[in-house]
Image (cartoon, rainbow, N blue to C red):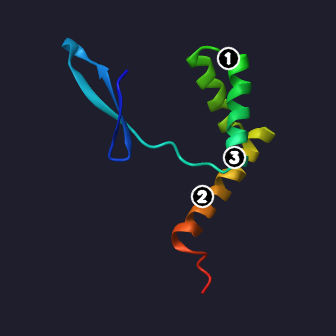
Amino acid sequence: MDLARDDNQFKTHNPVIHGQQDPVYYPEIPGYSEATATIVEALLVGVRQKFADIKTFTRELLLRFTADEPDETIQGLSSNIKTDQAREYEENFGSGNA
């Protein structure tokens, strides 16, 4: 797979019909705080240990995120992402307190 940097996005070419290649663009990976990155890594490692193929891996992640009562990892992740978003907003626009 050929990866190249293009306008703050990753660009990858995938073969399509008749051997032609069209670019597929992926957004940048968001920056996480260290605490959030640790939770994300723990979640992914835990699911990978139980579910090796992409179909069951994805299914398990979706089930965890959409559960009526999410486990502690999902609750922690949700809380940290909200905190990361608030921190990023304040860095870009200030706290809003004049």
Q: Is residue 48 above or below residue 75?
A: above
- The reply, left or right, for residue 71 in relation to residue 62 is right
Residue 83 in view in this figure: yes
Secondary structure under the numbered disc 1 in the rendered image:
loop
> Vertical placement of 39 versus 93: above or below?
above
Residue at image coords 53%, 47% = 30
Q: Which mark is residue 20?
A: none
Residue at x-position 66% and y-position 37%: 65
Q: To which residue does mark 1 refer?
A: 51
Alpha-carbon span between mark 2 and mark 1: 30 Å
Residue 36, percent from left and from top: 69, 46
Q: Quadrant of residue 94?
A: bottom right
Q: Is the C-beta separation of discs 2 and 1 under 8 Å?
A: no
Left or right: residue 36 versus residue 7 is right
Looking at the image, is mark 1 or mark 3 earlier in the sequence?
3
Along the line of sight, which residue is nearer the eye, 69 or 31?
A: 31
Q: Nearer the viewer, residue 5 or 36?
A: 5
Q: Position of residue 96 (x, y in %)?
A: 58, 78
Q: CA distance from mark 1 to mark 3?
A: 22 Å
Res. 85 mark: 2
N-terminal label among 2 and 3: 3
Q: Quadrant of the C terminus?
A: bottom right
Residue 11: image quadrant is top left
State whether residue 98 is above or below residue 37: below
Hey, what amino acid is under mark 2? Gln
For badge 1, the amino acid type reads: Phe
Which mark is drawn over residue 36? 3
Instruction: Give the residue at x 73% y 40%.
Output: 39
Please tell me which residue is depicted at 24% across the width and 22% down the height of the picture: 21
Q: Is residue 90 shown above or below 7?
A: below
Residue 95 in which image quadrant: bottom right
